[in-house]
Amino acid sequence: MVSAVMSAAEPRAVRRRAWLTNANAWLLLLPAVVLLATFTHYPILATLYHSFFSLSRGGASEFVGLENYTYMLEDDVFWQVLRNNIVFAIATVPTSIALALLMAVWVDKKMAGRSFLRLAFFTPTVLPMIAVANIWLFFYTPNYGLLDQFLKSLGFAGHNWLGDPSTVMSCLAAMVVWKEAGFFMIFYLAALQTIPPELKEAAEVEGASRWYFFRRVTLPLLMPTTLFISINALINSFKLVDQLVIMTKGGPNNASSLLLYYIYEVAFTFQDTAFAATLTVTLIAILAAVALTKFVYLDRRIHYQ
Amino acid sequence: MSEIVVNAVSKTWGGVGGVNRISFKADAGTLLVLLGPSGCGKSTTLRLIAGLEEVDSGTITIGGRDVTHLSPAQRNISMVFQSYALFPHLNVAENIIFGLRVRGVGRAERDARLRKVADIVGLSHLLERKPSQLSGGQRQRVALGRAIIAEAPVCLMDEPLSNLDAKLRHEMRTEIRSLQQRLGMTMVYVTHDQTEAMTMADRVILMRDGHIEQNGAPHELYNEPASDFTARFIGTPPMNIISWEAGAVLGIRPEHISLVENGGVPATVKAVEYLGADSIILCDVKGETVSVRQTGYCDLPTGAQVALGWQNRHIHLFDRDSGKRRAGSHLPHRGFPLNERQ
């Protein structure tokens, strides 16, 4: 009898302890869960929900199925901003990564003024995008801007850099590369410093040239960093639109508008929240797909230490 | 032949550390050990021979060729690093043939040589593994394989065994030595472990503060230490150094001291370390510690009064100020020298 009671009590005690452990874990997670749910997960689901409904100006909104999406696919401006965004990403991501790597390799060397150079490369990162946009706005100003004054001194005519659809995208890309490269350099610099110096010496004894060592050892060892940076750069190319507000407002004729800026316009200027929700879902889908393929496909080919 | 001659070589970093006008020669096909405490300049010397550091003055020749200002690759050497310096993203095979790839050796020859070397270092079944999937001893073998596949006549080793456990270290010691003899390489081997030096070397160079303290065969360093520093550095436990008459200190190896019945130097037992085959008895002689090696087990209790004796032919005398060995260290008297001091 006594032993039967004991054995019945024991699992209950174990279960009680397991329940307490679980409760404790959930309580610890609670603050983060609340914040994430309120400001990330709920808005995503709400956006998805609204993208299937008509706009409710005063009246009740109706379920319209994929109508918003059909409308989006027929919208010329959507296709143009999407094309703009892809061009912008292709122009800024590889350039800023290559530049970051170049700067990192340079300031990793032992030389006089190294700290100053590192600081100089990093400075654009510290500046807010709004400030950067204002500075570059002055560079690009027709006739009395820095760029035009320089070109004029060489005998060229002035040019409305940001007002010309054929040059506005390149101008914005150059500015974003300038802003971003220094930030990515820091990651490369940190990664370079984890590569043991003996590897270089071992390669030197074997007769490997500096370029051979860089190609066959340094670059592969930097691949995890490159993957991390390229995903960040890609996300930034879709995410950073502050400069458009200051410099072009997406113009001329949507030539410099990007997807996120278009969403902002649709939502807050045209007050079409249903269509803005549809565009947002599309943007999130694009970014998730890009990140997923990169992690799934590239991770297998990268050496992690 | 590929003997290495280092002639009056100096290297400092703004007057700190480095080596000061050292000269020595490593005969072709022999194993030379650079031994010394940390910071004595032994690794610097090796790196100077390898060409990883530039000499301030002096010359280095390998096989009669002046290599003082040549790059490491031009010196036709191979090297094993303390950390092994394996490329973490390459597998064992790719690590071993790295140098052959650099020099553009054809695929067929590369494969043939890889098979041979992998067989020698016993890695044939691990060629596809990455360094992170290997044990310390296996990594060491990869580094060794990478060094010997070059078939360079000179192999430089920088404390290659210091990251291994004691058992493995003993194994690799024998293996490296037999490999060196089989392939007829000239090897310069840096270590701070005097056991490694004594067991492997044809010749040992003991260094201290950037200069050579003694250069000789292992038995010479043991039996005729040129200074009290050498005497203290070589041997476990090291030679006992006791104050002696004015201006001199006396050195005697623990195995040359015995406990005697009558006469001898009175001493107090401080501790006994039992090592299996023998015991080390630590005695206090007038405030100085003297260790005595006795075969077998010793059950003397702490605080026991004993008497120590030894033969004069085992005595070494060193100058107290310079630490240099005194010529004709043997004493004129027979008997127990410490007795006569009293």
Image (spheres, rainbow, N blue to C red):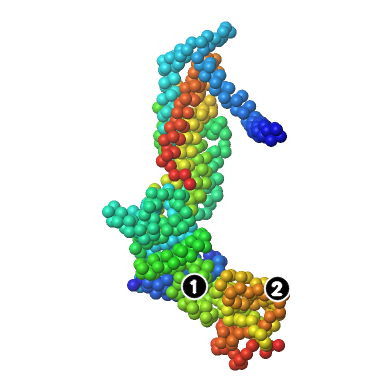
**The quadrant where residue A70 appears:** top left
**Which amino acid, by three-letter code, is at mark 2?**
Thr
**The quadrant where residue B327 appears:** bottom right
Q: Nearer the viewer, mark 2 or mark 1?
A: 2
Query: Residue B104 at what x, y percent from top left?
Result: 31, 54
Query: Residue B31 at what x, y percent from top left?
Result: 42, 71
Question: From mark 2 to mark 1, how far is it between C-alphas?
Answer: 33 Å
**Residue lying furthest front:** A1
Residue underneath mark 1? B198
Residue underneath mark 2? B302
Identify the chain of the residue marked 1, using the numbered disc in the image. B
Question: Residue at (61%, 81%) from the top-left corner?
Answer: B257
First along the sequence among labels 2 and 1: 1
Are discs 2 and 1 located on one and the same chain? Answer: yes
Q: Is residue B239 visible?
A: no
**Which amino acid, by three-letter code, is at mark 1?**
Met
In the rendered image of this protein, does residue A93 appear above or below residue B148?
Answer: above
Question: Residue at (59%, 86%) from the top-left corner?
Answer: B311
Query: Residue B172 at what x, y percent from top left?
Result: 45, 63
**Tag 2, which secondary structure?**
loop
